[in-house]
Amino acid sequence: MLVQIENERGVSNAEAIAATDGVDALFVGPADLSANLGVFGEFEGERFREAVESVLAAGAATDTPVGTLATTDAGIERYTSWGFDFLIAGTDAGHLQRGAASMRERARENL
């Protein structure tokens, strides 16, 4: 089972959560966590970074993988450099939107 850590209580209890029988991985929801910390979207900010480091440490202490969502190239670079074990790279809606925009541009170029 993968469990999401998206608020201060989850961050504070991340090690106990990770050690719970049946928990296979932790997942940091960056938008929800940053919002619940009062720093929405400040993914480079100290408060968010400290919370993430706490969750990563909990994962390391319990040998539990920790993942997150990255929706930009900068996010992929950030989170891989921070030591996450896995990433969800993008969202289905984002991939569909970029693909449709790319196809539209190709059609316009060729008409």
Image (cartoon, grey):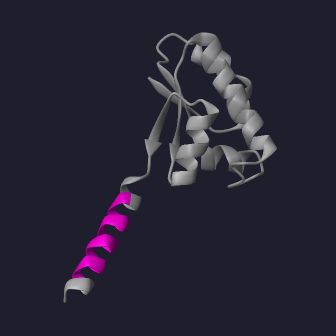
Q: Position of residue 44 (x, y in %)?
A: 72, 48
Q: Residue furthest right?
A: 46
Q: Position of residue 43 (x, y in %)?
A: 68, 49
Answer above or below: position of 88 versus 83.
below
Answer above or below: position of 104 versus 90.
below
Q: Quadrant of residue 92?
A: bottom left
Q: Is residue 59 left or right of residue 44?
A: left
Residue at 70% over, 22% down: 13
User: Which portion, as a residue range, is magenta?
Assistant: 95-107
Q: Is residue 54 left or right of residue 1?
A: right
In the rendered image, residue 61 lying in the magenta stretch gets the answer: no
User: Can residue 28 be seen?
Assistant: no
Q: Residue furthest left?
A: 111
Q: Quadrant of residue 48?
A: top right
User: Can residue 88 be seen?
Assistant: yes
Q: Position of residue 8 (x, y in %)?
A: 74, 35
Location of the N terminus by quadrant is top left
In the rendered image, residue 96 lying in the magenta stretch gets the answer: yes
Nearest the eye: 76 or 14: 76
Residue at 53% over, 45% down: 76
| Count of labels in the image | 0
Answer above or below: position of 94 versus 110.
above
Magenta segment, prevailing SS (helix, strand or loop): helix
Location of the C terminus by quadrant is bottom left
Q: Residue furthest bottom?
A: 111
Residue at 72% over, 27% down: 54
Q: Position of residue 69 (x, y in %)?
A: 51, 44
Nearest the eye: 55 or 103: 103
Residue at 51% over, 10% down: 21
Q: Is residue 99 left or right of residue 43?
A: left
